[in-house]
Amino acid sequence: SDVLDICSSWVSHFPEDVKLGKTVGLGMNREELARNKQLTDYVVQNLNVNPVFPFKENSFDVVTCVVSVDYLTRPLEVFSEISRVLRPGGTAIISQSNRCFPTKAINIWLNTNDIQHVFIIGAYFHYSGGFKPADSIDISPNPGFSDPMFIIRADAK
């Protein structure tokens, strides 16, 4: 599978024992992206300034965003771009915890709880178009006693 990791940084969270095709990181820090050993290529871009991905339609099988969706100021535009670059039947996977940099997170995120965050991400998929209904799973290591971790995913139409 060809994978695009948006809001990427010095580490991607892909299983090391899984063979991936092209694995592209799109993030804001060139030095961090260059240190990411799981990427085959990277692009430096601030999605809050320019949410248009520099990739052709149907370029990727999977698009991921790991614990960074809460920083997107133009999420519907970004999610529309996710749908545009996904191949038919491709999957978008968003992971989300309750940890963030409060000075960088969007206001709605700071004023809602963990379950509401899941619904917000689901709404991004729904209202951006191009996706089948999203589903979510709680993958918290010790629910109720550890930091929460949720996966919200949707397949391209």
Image (cartoon, rainbow, N blue to C red):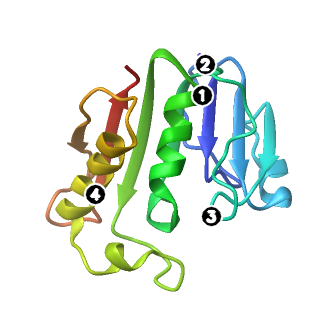
Q: Which of the marked residues, 3 or 1, is nearer the chain's N terminus?
A: 3
Q: Which of the marked residues, 2 or 1, is nearer the chain's N terminus?
A: 2
Taking 35 as reference, is 104 left or right? left
Which amino acid type corresponds to the residue marked 1 in the rendered image?
Answer: Val
Q: Which residue is mark 4?
A: 120
Q: Which residue is mark 1?
A: 85
Mark 1: secondary structure: helix
Q: Which of the marked residues, 4 or 1, is nearer the chain's N terminus?
A: 1
Which amino acid type corresponds to the residue marked 2 in the rendered image?
Answer: Asn
For the point 53% across and 48% down, the residue is 78
Disc 2 versus disc 1: distance between alpha carbons?
Answer: 5 Å
Disc 3 versus disc 1: distance between alpha carbons?
Answer: 18 Å
Which amino acid type corresponds to the residue marked 3 in the rendered image?
Answer: Asn
Sort mark 1 into few (<14), some (14-19) or many (20+) by Cα contacts within 10 Å: many
Q: Which of the marked residues, 2 or 3, is nearer the chain's N terminus?
A: 3
The quadrant in which the N terminus is found is: top right
Query: Visible in this render: residue 101?
Result: yes
Relative to 20, say whether 112 is above or below.
Answer: below
Disc 2 versus disc 4: distance between alpha carbons?
Answer: 25 Å
Sort mark 3 into few (<14), some (14-19) or many (20+) by Cα contacts within 10 Å: some
Residue 58, label in figure: 2
Query: In the rendering, at what x and y percent does residue 14 appear?
Result: 55, 35
Query: In the rendering, at what x and y percent does residue 9 appear?
Result: 68, 55
Taking 9 as reference, is 95 left or right? left
Q: Which of the marked residues, 2 or 4, is nearer the chain's N terminus?
A: 2
Taking 110 as reference, is 14 left or right? right
Assess whether mark 3 and mark 2 are in contact (beta carbons under 8 angstroms). Answer: no
Mark 2: secondary structure: loop
Sort mark 4 into few (<14), some (14-19) or many (20+) by Cα contacts within 10 Å: some
Relative to 51, say whether 2 is above or below.
Answer: above
Assess whether mark 1 and mark 2 are in contact (beta carbons under 8 angstroms). Answer: yes
